[in-house]
Amino acid sequence: MNDCLFCKIIAGEIPSAKVYEDEYVYAFRDINPQAPVHILVCPKAHIACADELDESNSVHVAKCFEAIAKIAKAEGLDKGYRVVNNCGEDGGQTVMHLHFHILGGLKLSDKMI
Ligand code: AMP
Ligand code: ZN
């Protein structure tokens, strides 16, 4: 867990452009944005990927989505946005700490892939 990039960002050991933080959640701007608004929303708890979720830890996902609604309002995404989770190698996940991408600020493609 100590080698986890996002755990280090959450701990303040690596700088980030923080947009939101509470007891459960830390959110910051993606360093390589794919949309005018591109924010990563992470549980503070280290959960490697969506595949590790079960009834013992799903509260962290609920807290992420509560934060997502607040962040979207704060960012002015009143016309909508997309929430993306990449899971595992085939899903394109590159950082193995669960996170949700908020993508917005433009009309997104109707294609999922
Ligand atoms: P994923 O491919 O779903 O695992 O997403 C990882 C995301 O983390 C990518 O969109 C990267 O651009 C982003 N990223 C990697 N390192 C950093 C960093 N130090 N600060 C902010 N975003 C980062
Ligand atoms: Zn982590």
Image: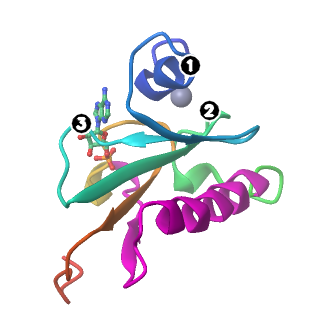
Which quadrant contains ligand 1? Answer: top left
Which mark sits nearer the N-terminus, 1 or 3?
Answer: 1
The magenta segment is: 59-88
Q: Rate crowding at label 1 as few (under 14), some (14 to 19) or many (20 or more) other CA atoms within 10 Å.
A: few
Q: Which dot, 1 or 3, sits closer to the camera?
A: 3
Q: CA distance from mark 3 to mark 2?
A: 20 Å
- Provide the secondary structure element on which disc 1 rests: loop
Eyeballing the image, is 66 above or below 13? below
Eyeballing the image, is 74 above or below 21? below
User: Which residue position holds label 1?
Assistant: 1
Q: Rate crowding at label 3 as few (under 14), some (14 to 19) or many (20 or more) other CA atoms within 10 Å.
A: few
Q: Quadrant of residue 38?
A: bottom left
Q: Rate crowding at label 2 as few (under 14), some (14 to 19) or many (20 or more) other CA atoms within 10 Å.
A: some
Going by the image, does 33 lie left or right of 101?
left
- Provide the secondary structure element on which disc 2 rests: loop
User: Which residue position holds label 2?
Assistant: 46
* Residue 51 x, y percent position in the rendering: 55, 55
* Residue 54 x, y percent position in the rendering: 74, 58
Q: Are marks 2 and 1 in contact (CB under 8 Å)?
A: yes
Q: Quadrant of residue 28?
A: top left
Q: Amino acid at mark 3?
A: Ile
Q: Quadrant of residue 45?
A: top right
Q: Amino acid at mark 2?
A: His
Going by the image, does 97 lie left or right of 113?
right
User: Which residue position holds label 3?
Assistant: 31
- Provide the secondary structure element on which disc 3 rests: loop
Task: Determine whether the beta carbon of the residue marked 1 sits less than 8 angstroms from the nearest atom of ligand 2.
Answer: yes
Residue at (48% x, 10% y) in the render: 13
